[in-house]
Image (cartoon, helix red, strand yellow):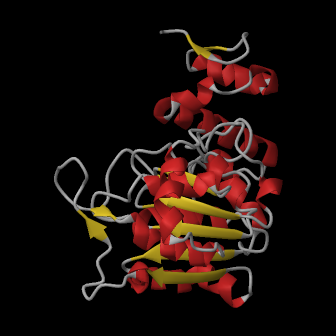
Amino acid sequence: MKIDIVSVFPEYFEVMNLSLMGKAQAKGLLEIKAHNLRDWTHDVHHSVDDTPVGGGAGMVMKPEVWSECLDELLGFSRPSAATANTDTETATDAVDTSDPGDPAAPNSSALSGTPVLIFPNPSAPLFTQRDATELSHADHLLFGCGRYEGYDARIPDYYRSQGVDVREYSIGDYVLNGGEVAVSVMLEAITRLMPGFMGNPDSIVEESYTGEGALLEHRQYTKPAVWRGISVPEVLLSGNHGKVDRFRRDEALTRTNEIRPDLIEALDCKALDKADRKTLMALGWEVSATHPRKLDR
């Protein structure tokens, strides 16, 4: 997978040379390159921002700098000066308002050979494990790190109008100083799902949010069996794999009920076994319909 990252602080991404990400690059699974957006400026101050149209606090990243950078990284020919403004205005009318997390989003096979342009944005749909799984099949990801008050909204609009698969994602209900942290988060979530990235591929099978009927993962323990007076649950020491699996499944259901009941509501009741149903009913769920329903609501 080829990964390009555009930032005014490209040195931030030196961290990508550490741990499994660094090993994946050494093995040739990944090719990560961080670019300095200021390399595409032409003024003495290397300015990448300007004041907001309509007034307001802060500064907004300029579309003309971003477009020169993205055109080059995407292999686009640059519009002539006579048509640049017309192209941008047309692009504004051609906004793709589809939710990147929508089931109608392109499937993983459609990502082969086509670049995906990704902008972190706290006002965008939430980045999920489903998105990470889909994007792990892409050949080329291009991330743009916003700063200040963000990037000019015409930038993603324009590239969508040119046929580029453009995604905007939030990583949570909070605001950061820039997109660098968010890009690092998304990259970790995406690349670890690539075949050959993890030393033991089974380690990602039963994680939180993974697969159909996703739940929060059960808690994990290691040796010693007793630490500072606190014991590992006895069933985990029994050697009975069936009982261990059931204990972990029940704990996953219980933790998900406590922390993310919305995930319980999304389960398919037909896919639940008898023990799952028993556990959920004990937790106050009705499981005879298509999806579980909390009885105390």
Above or below 251: residue 222 = below
* Direction from residue 121 to residue 106 in the image, left or right: right
> In the rendering, at what x and y percent does residue 201 appear?
77, 66
Above or below 200: residue 214 = above
> In the rendering, at what x and y percent does residue 261 appear?
53, 28
Frontmost residue, 176 versus 213: 176
The answer to whether residue 81 is seen in the rendering is yes
Frontmost residue, 60 versus 214: 60
Frontmost residue, 61 versus 268: 61
> In the rendering, at what x and y percent does residue 35 appear?
49, 82
Which of the 4 image quarters holds residue 79? bottom right
Residue appearing at x 60%, y 23% in the figure = 265
The answer to whether residue 179 is seen in the rendering is no
Q: Quadrant of the N terminus?
A: bottom right
* Direction from residue 40 to residue 87 in the image, left or right: right
Above or below 12: residue 208 = above
Residue appearing at x 56%, y 83% in the figure = 33
Above or below 23: residue 7 = above
Residue appearing at x 66%, y 76% in the figure = 75
> In the rendering, at what x and y percent does residue 19 appear?
57, 82
Numbered-mark total: 0
Which of the 4 image quarters holds residue 166? bottom right
Frontmost residue, 213 versus 188: 188
Residue appearing at x 33%, y 65% in the figure = 147
